[in-house]
Image: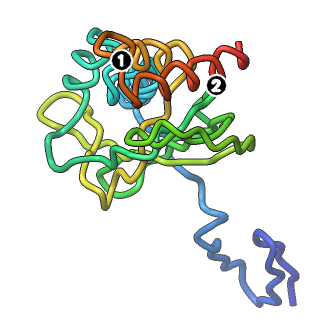
């Protein structure tokens, strides 16, 4: 009788037969083009593509998505940074995991900031569209509200600071002062 180590399982087998548990199988990484599309999309979101913080970022993000739904518009998640953690092929799609340094959320209607600093793990899915990769926008595949950096939030808040002076303008000024403390 032979003792065989197979992942975390030990099998007592007469012959050498061993199947790895799904979590122990080698995972195939996404194509570099898919990861580049994910990186560009995440960066465009960070620059304010989804909230009007950057017209250039909005134009770039539109080219990187499949128009198969609408992502959540709120809350706006204020982040200090982001990085791609992992990428893996799942069936015919690519799943990219992102790590965000989250600072809090902002309600786009009331302009109220709720601080909450922690590391957030999120995922986006990409699918091949003809000869390129694109980000799914349907809520089944993309459930992330906008994850935006400080400069983009400032640009967005400046949209509210033009006359006439009203309650939302006053809240925008107050929120801008709060966001400036994070730089």
Front one among 177 and 135: 177
Query: Residue drawn 49% across and 48% down?
Result: 123
Quarter of the rendering containing residue 179:
top right
Q: Residue shown at 21%/28% (left/top)?
A: 132
Residue 118 locus on image (x, y percent): 74, 44
Residue at (26%, 16%) from the top-left corner? 60
Label 2: how many Cα within 10 Å (few below 14, some 14–19, many 20+): some
Q: Quadrant of residue 114?
A: top right
Q: Quadrant of the N terminus?
A: bottom right
Helix, strand or loop at mark 1: loop
**In the rendered image of this protein, does residue 48 appear above or below residue 137?**
above
Residue 70: x percent and y percent? 22, 47
| Front position in the image: 46 or 73 | 73
Quarter containing the C terminus: top right
- Residue 128 against residue 165 in the figure, above or below: below
Q: CA distance from mark 2 to mark 1?
A: 33 Å
Label located before the other in sequence (2 or 1): 2
Residue at 44 percent across and 38 percent down: it is 30
Total numbered labels: 2
Left or right of 3? Residue 93 is: left
Where is mark 1, residue-wise? Answer: 165
Q: Which residue is mark 2?
A: 81
Of circles 2 and 1, the one toward us is 1
* Vertical order, 44 against 151 (above or below): below
């Amino acid at each position: 009788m032979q003792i065989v180590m197979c992942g975390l399982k030990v099998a007592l087998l007469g012959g050498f037969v061993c199947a790895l548990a799904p979590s122990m199988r080698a995972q195939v990484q996404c194509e570099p083009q898919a990861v580049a599309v994910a990186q560009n999309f995440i960066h465009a979101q960070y620059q304010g593509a989804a909230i009007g913080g950057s017209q250039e970022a909005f134009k770039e993000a539109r080219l990187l998505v499949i128009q198969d739904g609408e992502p959540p518009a709120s809350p706006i998640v204020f982040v200090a940074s982001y990085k791609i953690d992992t990428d893996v092929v799942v069936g015919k799609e690519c799943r990219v995991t992102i790590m965000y340094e989250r600072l809090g959320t902002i309600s786009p209607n009331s302009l109220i900031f709720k601080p909450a600093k922690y590391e957030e793990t999120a995922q986006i899915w990409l699918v091949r569209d003809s000869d390129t990769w694109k980000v799914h926008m349907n809520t089944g595949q993309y459930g992330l509200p906008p994850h935006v950096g400080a400069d983009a939030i400032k640009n967005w808040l400046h949209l509210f600071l033009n006359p006439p002076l009203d309650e939302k303008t006053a809240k925008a000024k107050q929120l801008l002062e709060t966001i400036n403390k994070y730089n």
